[in-house]
Amino acid sequence: MNQEILIKNTTIINEGKSLVADVLIVKDRIYKIGNIAIKPNYTVIDGTGKHLLPGIIDGQVHFRDPGLTHKGDLYTESKAAVAGGVTSFIDMPNTVPNVLTVESLKDKYEIASRKSLANYAFFLGVNGDNIDEVLKTDTSQFIGVSDDGLYFTKKGNLLADNPNTMEKLFANCKSIIAIHSEKEEIVEANENNFRQQYGENIPASYHPLIRSTKACFEATERAITLAKKHEARLHILHLTTEAETHLFQNDIPLQAKKITTEVSVHHLWFSDKHYERLGMLIKWNPAIKTEQDQRGLLKAVLDDRIDIITTDHAPHTLEEKQKPYFQSMSGAPMVQHSLNCMLEFYKNGYMSLEKIVEKMCHNPAILYHITNRGFIREGYFADLTLVDLNSQWTVTKDSLLYKCGWSPLEGTTFQTRINQTFVNGNLVYDNGLFHENKFGMSIEFNNK
């Protein structure tokens, strides 16, 4: 497509405001915003009646590449992401091998450069085994370090379970430290109790009692205490309980926060009442909990105790999900539908468009110090998504782009549709068609 694209007469949602205007894209950037005359060399897209949002920045995904590509890979999952309005993502370290060295991190960036349709960044994994090696490097070169998902490899890899390791990291790390916050000792005690009652076939509905509020709250409270002691930059991943929301501040701007958190879409969308219908398909760690927790998380998003919204997109094969409790893998695919889910909250009167854009676009860019993305501003990268807020459709298996081929949202009817997604000025997704002539870029950030 022509490198000069004019989106005419669209409603721009950006920086707390709604504005009807035109947007001119030249090469990979937003060149001008305003009332722009059409020129013969422009490719014109009519945005009348549509809403233009910054591209979603998903701060937590598991795209499974390398080593677990039977579930998903950087091509298939980024394609699903772009179809859902996601233009940038940050991927977690629990691939095979785990990303525990600078060399393996560089390898992952190289794979993405030739496979990902969206922009990308990657966490470096950190645990008790590699912390000394990590701290020998300039940690400001990483967008963040994380232990998320590493507990699948070996027990004892959760930082929240290792205060001495956590304290050493907090005292010396110059990047964001993003942690999975559950006390494994509490989880294991709960597992043993339910195993005595049910053997290996524990019903899915007991998952939130095993990965309990107590396990989450105590881990988060301890991590925050230690981070404050060392003035570390701590980010708590995928918050699940109303109780934990009260541990976070909303009386200072995000730029000034050293302790931050997120909620994943599924913890806003589902509650424990859905286990009866969906069973292991909605088994996530930390677990989906009660409707009270669901309401508490939404309230904390609205009042800014929760800073960003992510997906924790984690594809597994259907066979892996449908096994008995202890064998069933935790996680599910969400990235293709995260924006649609949040737009349902808007349609139902729970959240404004401006707040959705703040939590899914602006704040991830602020939190991770991402350069020239996350906002609709002249000179910024043209990462944009054009949505129709009045176009009903139903999620079917045939409509899914995930390599794993299933979704817990199958059968869900949405009232909104993603029409177009631009990545670095390229119209990658256009009403069901993909233009795959260019790959995404490595996300630039500034931790200095």
Image (cartoon, grey):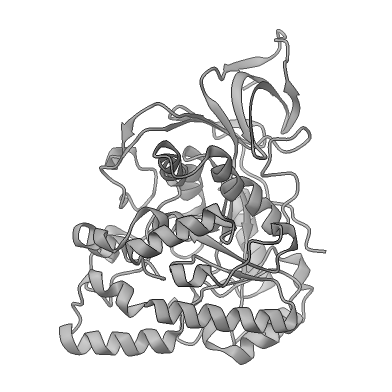
Q: In this view, which residue lies farthest toward the right?
A: 448
The structure residue drawn at horizontal position 50% and vertical position 72%, both measured from the top left corner, is: 244
Along the line of sight, which residue is nearer the eye, 305 or 127?
305
Q: Position of residue 134 (x, y in %)?
A: 70, 79
Q: In this view, which residue lies farthest toward the top?
A: 40
- Count of numbered circles on the image: 0
Where 206 sits versus 39, above or below?
A: below
Taking the image as shown, residue 162 lies to the left or right of residue 396, namely: right
Residue 63 in view here: no
**Image quadrant where residue 276 sits:** bottom left
Residue 220 in view here: yes
Quarter of the rendering occupied by the N terminus: top right
Q: Position of residue 224 (x, y in %)?
A: 61, 78
Q: Position of residue 381 (x, y in %)?
A: 71, 38
The structure residue drawn at horizontal position 69% and vertical position 35%, both measured from the top left corner, is: 376
Where 393 sits versus 322, above or below?
A: above
